[in-house]
Each structure stands twice: as structure tokens, then as C-alpha cells.
Amino acid sequence: MTLREAVLDGLALLLPVECAGCGDPDRAVCARCRPALAPDPCSRRLADGTRVFSALDYDGVAREVILAFKERGRTELAGVLAPGLAASVVAAGAGGEPGGVVELVSVPGSRRSRRRRGFDPVAMLVSRAGLQRATVFAPARPHPAQKSLSLEQRAANLEGVFALRVPVAARRFLLVDDVVTTGATLMAAAAALRAGGAEVVAAAVVASTPKFSGGMIGPHGERSASVP
Ligand SMILES: [Zn+2]
């Protein structure tokens, strides 16, 4: 934990807090919302064949808690979200041991989002989950927001965004991220690793959108309905 993270955690304890899941005055996450954060890993394949393991559906309480963590500086929520990431990593069959066969690598954020948030959400979750992470990516190059773009537009938008800063040939990686929506970001990061000669064995995330907007295949091989 960095000093900044420790300070943010301390502030969260001092300030009045409402449940990040339902807004009731309570601790970080109230007893009624907690069960919604119990990890239940499942996996789906991205359009490029990469299998993604996810512990939670990105809706309801889980979505509120993740947004509060990432976008509203509620860093104390790392503690309730990290078990989800850990469960996905275990389901993917990788432990992230230092010098292990499969190394964990997180999808890099941009310098700008890091500055805006004051912390790196995925790095914080990885460390809170007790996992080790290899640093192979440079900070993501600035790119327009992905939100309103289709999968194809997102892929084009991400061209050249992820650059490696160390050689990765013959190394094996498990990509980790907080949320997968279309999978465009994970696929772009995986493509950068593969272009460098690495193997991407799978990806592990805390949560995934129940309805992917195309390109995702369900646990039983069905392709999800396309939504705009
Ligand atoms: Zn609640």
C-alpha cells in the first residue's frame, strides 16, 4: 500500500460513510449488500478466444460498489472487492507467484486517470488480494472515452494505446482488470502482449456486464444478444 492509499483509507474511516451498495448510513458496505459481493466465478470467451474469468455481475450492488471505489475515491472498498479478483484468478488457475509460471499483469490505466483518481484501482485490488503483479506495460496512451462506442469502434480507438516497456517474449501472463464490458480493452492489451511474443493464458476480472454488447460467448457457448 502506498502512503497515499493509506491516507485515503484513513480519511474514509474518519468521514461519515454510507453503504456504497445502497446508500444507507452505514459502514463501507452494509450487511444486506454484502451477499451481492460474494464471489461466484464464471467464464466467457472474448471474440479473440481469450477466456475471461469473472466473479460478479456488473450490476446492482456490485456495480455501485465498484463505481464508488473507482470513481468516488472510496478506497476502503478494495477490501470487499479484492476477494472477487482473487476468486477469478484462482478459477483461472493462476496464483501470481513471483517468478511463477504464469505472471499476473494488469491492464494499464492512463497517467491522466491515475492523476484524476489519485490511485490505480486495479493495482490496489491486486495488492489487497495478496497477489503479485508484473509491470510490463507503459501507462496507457491517452484515448477518447470508450463508453458510447461499438466493439469495432472501441478496438480502433485502442490501437496503439498499450505499449510494452520490457521484453515479454516466452513469458506467460494472466491479464487482470476490474470490469469487463465489451472485452475490447482486454483484447487490445492481450494483443500487445502476444505481439511481443508472450502467451496470454486467460484474463481475470472482478465483474462483468451480464449482457455483453457483442463478441462475447456465454458459459455454454451461446453468443450473447447484441445490445447498442
Ligand atoms: Zn447497503
Image: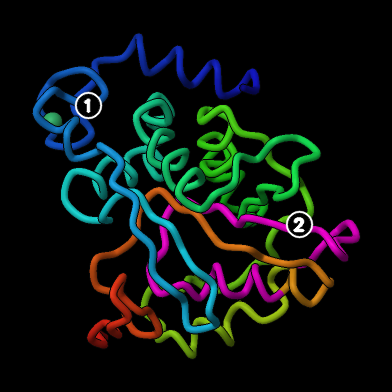
The mark that comes first in sequence, 1 or 2, is 1
Q: Position of residue 37 (x, y in %)?
A: 25, 38
Q: Position of residue 158 (x, y in %)?
A: 61, 77
Q: Residues within 10 Å of mark 2 (few under 14, many from 20)?
A: many
Kind of element beneath mark 2:
loop
Q: Quadrant of the N terminus?
A: top right
Task: State ligand 1's quadrant.
Answer: top left
> What residue sits right under mark 2 in the picture?
137
Magenta-highlighted residues: 163-191
Question: Is residue 85 depicted above or below 145 in this figure?
Answer: above
Residue 20 located left or right of residue 145: left
For the point 42% across and 63% down, which residue is it? 180
For the point 54% across and 60% down, which residue is it? 203
Give me the C-alpha separation between circle 1 and circle 2.
33 Å
Q: Is mark 1 within 8 Å of ligand 1?
A: yes
Q: Is residue 30 covered in magenta?
A: no
Viewer-nearest residue: 185 or 145: 185
